[in-house]
Image: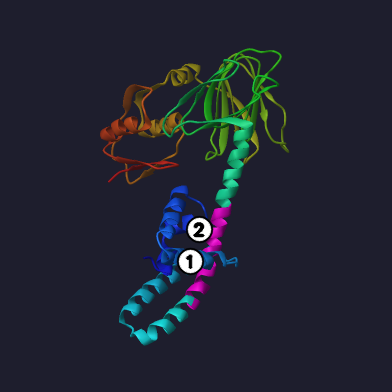
């Protein structure tokens, strides 16, 4: 049988109290049903948590959690050595102290529960409006839209397509990078929006890059004609740019600057085909290419010793496989985390 302090210190029990994990809810409901003593302990622990009603800062929450764990450990140790006559009074004092500490913990848990609920609500609303495509980390995703337009969604990217796409309009939203091959339709122009840019076309092929973790965004036109403009009201310049094949636009919102330049169409066409090519390429240029290809920042730790050049062609390879070959040649180790890749030199 669990004590009340053991229950409160158990993360799965906290998940049960705040209904944040279905499996944990079922586990503790089954536990409470096994005996009246277990049910009473579970109810008492829940009451202590739900009675909490104060708001404190996160630093204080962490301090309180550490203090409570210390109290729980002391309580367990002293209960083992105290004579029976003093145990009851000690337990009353301990509960009074623990209840004060738990005021902080409960607020943190309640706030976390509210955040989870709000996130779930936002996700449900988004699902009602859009078909959401999310590419796996380190891999691309091929998508065919309702109008037969083709999209290659780069790694670590999201494309939002309204459920009414190709009926009243053809508007999509991009977070990340993607290549678009758009079917012509003069009556329904295709419109792509990111946080900072908006591109409008009738039928063309182009590449857009707009990752949230990067300060700049860019669009490259491979065929057709493309109008690009800022998606926000600029104090400097709100005029759109008209692109022809080989033209690109780079935008940095932090300095409110949008510039038109040119790019290598053949190199981007290799990207579309899934061909990652290196020919006498420097270490830094390879790292930059991998960041662009897989849509993930790469952090380098330690001192790089290899100063040679790289050559080779990789077709539709996963990030992990390319890094294995790359690190074998450069004598480094890599670690793929949720938001970045770490290259470490000894």
Inspect this view and state whether residue 59 appears.
no
Question: Which color mode does the image show?
Answer: rainbow
Residue placed furthest toward the bottom: 85
- Horizontal and vertical percent position of residue 60: 52, 67
Q: Quadrant of residue 209?
A: top right
Question: Which quarter of the figure is the N terminus placed in?
Answer: bottom left
Q: Residue at x 67, y 28 (%)?
A: 229
> Which residue is labeled 2 in the image?
17
Q: Main secondary structure of the magenta part?
A: helix
- Horizontal and vertical percent position of residue 222: 55, 17
- Horizontal and vertical percent position of residue 325: 29, 31
Q: Is residue 104 left or right of residue 341?
A: right
Please give the label number shown on residue 36: none
- The magenta segment: 96-114
Q: Is residue 105 magenta?
A: yes
Q: Is residue 77 above or below residue 182?
A: below
Q: Is residue 283 magenta?
A: no
Q: Which structural element holds mark 1?
A: helix
> Which residue is labeled 1 in the image?
45
Circles 1 and 2: CB distance less than 8 Å? Answer: yes
Q: Is residue 265 left or right of residue 242?
A: left
Q: Which structural element holds mark 2?
A: helix
Q: Earlier in the sequence, mark 1 or mark 2?
A: 2
| Cα gap from disc 1 to disc 2, whole angstroms | 9 Å
């Amino acid at each position: 049988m669990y004590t009340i302090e053991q229950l409160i210190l158990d993360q799965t029990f906290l998940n049960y109290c705040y209904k944040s994990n279905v499996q944990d809810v079922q586990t503790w409901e089954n536990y409470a049903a096994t005996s009246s003593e277990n049910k009473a302990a579970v109810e008492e622990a829940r009451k202590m948590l739900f009675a909490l009603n104060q708001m404190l800062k996160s630093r204080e929450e962490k301090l309180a959690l550490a203090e409570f764990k210390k109290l729980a450990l002391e309580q367990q140790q002293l209960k083992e050595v105290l004579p029976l006559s003093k145990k009851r009074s000690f337990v009353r004092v301990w509960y009074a102290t623990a209840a004060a500490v738990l005021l902080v913990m409960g607020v943190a848990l309640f706030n976390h529960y509210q955040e989870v609920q709000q996130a779930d609500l936002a996700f449900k609303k988004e699902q009602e409006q859009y078909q959401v495509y999310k590419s796996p980390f380190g891999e691309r995703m091929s998508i065919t839209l309702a109008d037969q337009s083709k999209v290659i969604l780069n790694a670590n990217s999201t494309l939002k397509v309204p459920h009414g796409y190709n009926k009243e309009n053809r508007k999509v939203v991009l977070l990340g990078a993607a290549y678009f091959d758009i079917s012509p339709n003069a009556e329904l122009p295709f419109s792509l929006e990111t946080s900072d840019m908006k591109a409008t076309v009738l039928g063309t092929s182009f590449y857009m890059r707009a990752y949230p973790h990067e300060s700049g965004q860019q669009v490259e036109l491979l065929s057709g004609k493309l109008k690009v403009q800022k998606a926000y009201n600029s104090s400097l310049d709100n005029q759109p740019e008209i692109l022809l094949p080989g033209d690109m636009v780079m935008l940095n919102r932090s300095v409110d600057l949008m510039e038109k330049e040119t790019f290598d169409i053949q190199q981007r066409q290799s990207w579309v085909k899934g061909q990652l090519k290196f020919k006498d390429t420097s270490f830094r240029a390879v790292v930059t290419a991998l960041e662009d290809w897989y849509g993930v920042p790469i952090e380098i730790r330690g001192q790089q010793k290899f100063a040679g050049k790289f050559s080779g062609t990789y077709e539709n390879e996963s990030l992990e496989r390319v890094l294995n070959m790359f690190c074998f040649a450069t004598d480094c180790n890599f670690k793929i985390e949720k938001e970045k890749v770490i290259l470490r030199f000894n």
